[in-house]
């Protein structure tokens, strides 16, 4: 995943980012590089608050509000990094979310596939 974001604050918990609606993200899924809008694939995307954890944590937090309501997502990933004017990380098989009273997983199919091949 590669995207641009504004740094809002840095403290002992990490770096808080803002990515405005209309921004795009580039990622790889199934070996194919794709571009989509941040938060959801469809234009114009969502306004996002994001947390890069302090200490090179292998997760990444995202908060957004869409037509359903507020949601929180945690990407399990390599430590997010700042390079060449953009943020990036390698998404690892499983992500969790909470939307209203529902807790679930994104990318369960990727997790199951990785588990079957022993990754």
Image (cartoon, rainbow, N blue to C red):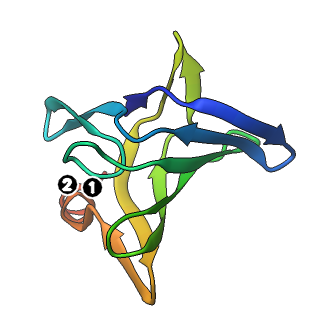
Residue 13: x and y in percent read 80, 50
| Res 82 quadrant in image | top right
Whether residue 94 sits left or right of residue 86 in the image: it is left
Considering the numbered disc 2 on the image, is that residue within a helix, a strand or a loop? loop
Residue 108: x and y in percent read 25, 67
Badge 2 local density, few (<14 within 10 Å), some, or many (20+)?
few
Considering the numbered disc 1 on the image, is that residue within a helix, a strand or a loop? loop
Q: Nearer the viewer, residue 110 or 43?
A: 43
Residue under the image location 75 percent in, 44 percent down: 14
Whether residue 23 sits left or right of residue 74 in the image: it is left
> Which residue bears the numbered disc 1?
118
> Which residue bears the numbered disc 2?
117
Q: Residue furthest right?
A: 12
Residue under the image location 31 percent in, 51 percent down: 119
Residue 58 appears in the figure = no
Decide: is 100 above or below 25: below
Residue 5: x and y in percent read 54, 30
Q: CA distance from mark 1 to mark 2?
A: 4 Å
Task: Give the position of the N terminus as an image quadrant.
Answer: top left
* Residue 45 circle label: none
| Tally of numbered tags | 2
Residue 16 appears in the figure = yes
Decide: is 52 above or below 70: above
Residue under the image location 28 percent in, 33 percent down: 27
Residue 56: x and y in percent read 68, 39
Badge 1 local density, few (<14 within 10 Å), some, or many (20+)?
few
Disc 1 vs disc 2: Cβ atoms closer than 8 Å? yes
Decide: is 111 above or below 33: below
């Amino acid at each position: 995943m590669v995207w641009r974001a504004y740094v809002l604050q840095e403290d002992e918990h990490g770096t808080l980012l803002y990515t405005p609606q209309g921004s795009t993200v580039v990622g790889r899924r199934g070996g194919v590089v794709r571009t989509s809008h941040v938060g959801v694939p469809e234009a114009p995307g969502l306004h996002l608050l994001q947390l890069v954890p302090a200490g090179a944590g292998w997760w990444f937090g995202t908060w957004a509000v869409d037509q359903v309501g507020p949601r929180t997502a945690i990407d399990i990933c390599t430590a997010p990094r700042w390079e060449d004017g953009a943020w990036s990380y390698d998404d690892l098989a499983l992500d969790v979310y909470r939307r209203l009273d529902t807790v679930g997983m994104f990318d369960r199919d990727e997790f199951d596939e990785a588990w079957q091949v022993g990754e």
